[in-house]
Amino acid sequence: MPHELALGEVFVPPFLVVGTLALVLTFLTVTLLNRYRLSRYFVAPSLVFVAIVAIYTILIGTFFIRI
Amino acid sequence: MSLLASDRVRLALIVSLSITTSFAISMSMGWTKPYWAGMAIAMCSLATRGESVFKGIQRLAGTAVAVVIALILISTLSQDRWSYALVVSLWLAFCSYRMQASSTYYFWYCSGFIVVLLTMMSGFESQRSFYVVIERAQETVLGLLCYIAYSTALSRQEATHAFRAKVQSQLALLAGRIEAMRSTEQAMRDRAPDRDSRRAINNITLELPTLHASAVLESFDIRERAGAWSQFLAELSRLALMLDRLDLSFLALRSQPDPADQKPLDTALDIFADRCRTIDRILTDKVALPIPEQLTILATEAPADTRLSPFVAGEARLRRETLRAIDHATRELHAWALDISDIRRHSQAVAPLYLPETFWPNPEFMLRSVTQFITFWAAFLMFIYVPALPDGPIVAMLGAVFSMNVMRQPWMKPLVMLVPIVIAILFGGLTHILIMPALDGFAGLGTMLFSCTFLIAYFLHTPQLQPLRGIGISQFLMALQISNQNQAYSATYVFNMIVAIAMLLLLIQFFKMVPISWRPEAVVQRLIRRYADSLDALLHGLRRDDARFDSWFARQRRLAHMRQLATLPGELANWIDKLDTTVFPEAEKVRLHQLAEQLAVLSHRMFDLVWLRDHKADGRFLALLAPEVAKWRAGLGGLIAALRSQDTAIDIDDLNRRLTQRVASLDSLVAGAVNGGPLADATPHSVVLMQEVLSAYRGVSLALIDTAARTRNANWPLLAETRF
């Protein structure tokens, strides 16, 4: 059943909020991974980046804001 | 009126007034998408009037080409989406390639993305597409006309002044560079050329053609002598190149001129610096000064001296050739300056290019096109196969726009663009929801449009912020959703657009790493490998005993490799600047920059060798030297392999020792042959050619050994480490 988040009188798609949060968290995560030189253990960092976005999206969408 | 004294306010006024006027006209005409005119203004508003008009003309011409292609595509492939996607993606890749290789990049950009925009917006319906195409063309023309009208009335920034100022500063920089060569020559030559000055000269060389084209549109004076200006700019570029060649030849200590050549060289440098200042005076004050004669020290050719070491004699001759080219370029510049100032007409055939054109494509530009092609396909497939995607056609359209933009500057981080785009869309969305419903008539709407666009243009006023200003205003106008028919108010479009753009940028981020990585570290390594490959191929093609290396195709390949050698050091320097400073400290970057400079030295040395190949050599000299030169070439091949694999375990002292031994053995071999030996009757021409070839081989060897030494200094493990 499609549903939307109501911010005041504006209906916002939940996927937008979840996606934004996931992106922000991913940026934070990869910055930390780069900072502590842990990213050298990944063969394809871009693939890992997209995977982390997907993981965060699913986690937030499952436990916090239902997509 | 004191407010108008500021160029910042004037620019903001021009942009906001022209957007408001274009909206007023298009809405009164009943056109459905008034923001198209506003977007044309946002993207074409540059620092000077001439530059804006030049960009506007490119947008119009690009739109015209795109309109024709879109109509053909709709009439032939509208029923077959895969054929359509294939043709469009190939066309976009071609336009992307041309964007890199041409000074009219914006024409190719518009020719590419507008095809996708028109075909998608018309929904592949022939009748509808006609109206969409016509409307797009009308709105683009309207926006540009409004902008030109207001900027003519209000702008004080003229491209003509900017162009003349750039020419003057280029002449001053070149004179300064000559003086720097002269002063360091008296002290010591073991120094790196001034990196900032080199970069400033190269940047101005790249900027001048566009500024010239802009000034031609703006000023009758420049337009009247456009041909002379073009010749002047070509000679100026040649002079910059030759000075670079001369300056870099001093980079290595071992490349100092013979003491006998010192004084003529000093005299020549003094005269060249004076000539640069004189040319500036002619252009500025229109002073009628006579064209200088060719330098007497360069006019006569010294006889071939067989007593000297062939390496020393050859080196002196090669440097003399460069000085002669500088002498010619400065005299030509003087003559063209007199022509431009209407003092004395000059006619001269266009001088041949330093490196002739070749049909062979630039591999780096090809890679950019391939990445753009893949990214567009990914966006298109997402549009087809993800039905839940909000505003799918927008993803495909923006996929073309963003992928072309990002691949023009592949060091850009796509996700960093997300922040200004989202801010602009949210600003537009909030205005749309909160302010627009309260407005009554165009008086209110116009005031709102004027205020908001004025604010954006005012805060983002510098030329460096122009791309951001363009993106900001165009996204703001899109998010406003001003319509001429049944105006509705909804935030859905705004949120959908944010989701679509975020997903798209994520996609681009991904395809910037797979299958070709555009991380600066990866590109630096790739460029060095490609440099080594081109060097190896050129060296291999120097063989004179195989007819295959004399074919037309082989010459084209050689030219392509030479172009690589000429451009890669500069490209490498650009990418080194893009390395993350937190990971690569300044000292690390300086070491890499030194390597790039050394590669530029090596390129000039290699060109000496390749050009000499085209001269017909005495067969007896070839027979005498062939075995030694073949061994030498094999040794150089080994060094190039070390450069390609970034091998840091090279024994530089051993290499130097081996080179000295080989030079000494060739010295005695040649001396024995020409002084009373089998080649005593050799013609002076063949002796000179032999000296130049041997000297060029030695020059390449020295430069390669220095390159190997620089390679050892770089931190390759740090470059090879994977990072996000």
Image (cartoon, coloured by chain):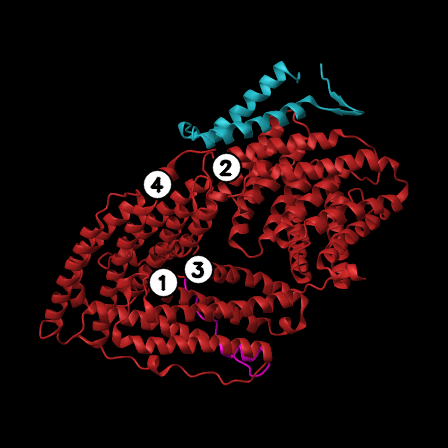
Distance from label 1 to label 3 (Cα)? 24 Å
The chain that appears cyan in the image is A
Of mark 3 and mark 2, the one earlier in the sequence is 3
Q: Which chain is red?
A: B
- The location of residue B400, given as percent across then percent down, is 60, 40
Q: Is label 2 in contact with label 4 (beta carbons under 8 Å)? A: no
The numbered disc on residue B512 is: 2
Report the residue at 34% width, 59% height from top: B601
At label 3, counting other C-alpha atoms closer than 10 Å, the crowd grade (few under 14, some 14-19, many 20 or more) is few
User: Are the numbered discs 3 and 2 placed on the same chain, yes or no?
Assistant: yes
Residue carrying label 3:
B357
Do callouts 4 and 1 point to residues on the same chain? yes
Q: Is residue B283 magenta?
A: no
Q: Position of residue B473 (x, y in %)?
A: 71, 45
The residue segment tinted magenta is B334-357
Q: Nearer the viewer, mark 3 or mark 2?
A: 2
Indicate which disc residue B248 carries: 1
Three-letter code, disc 4: Trp
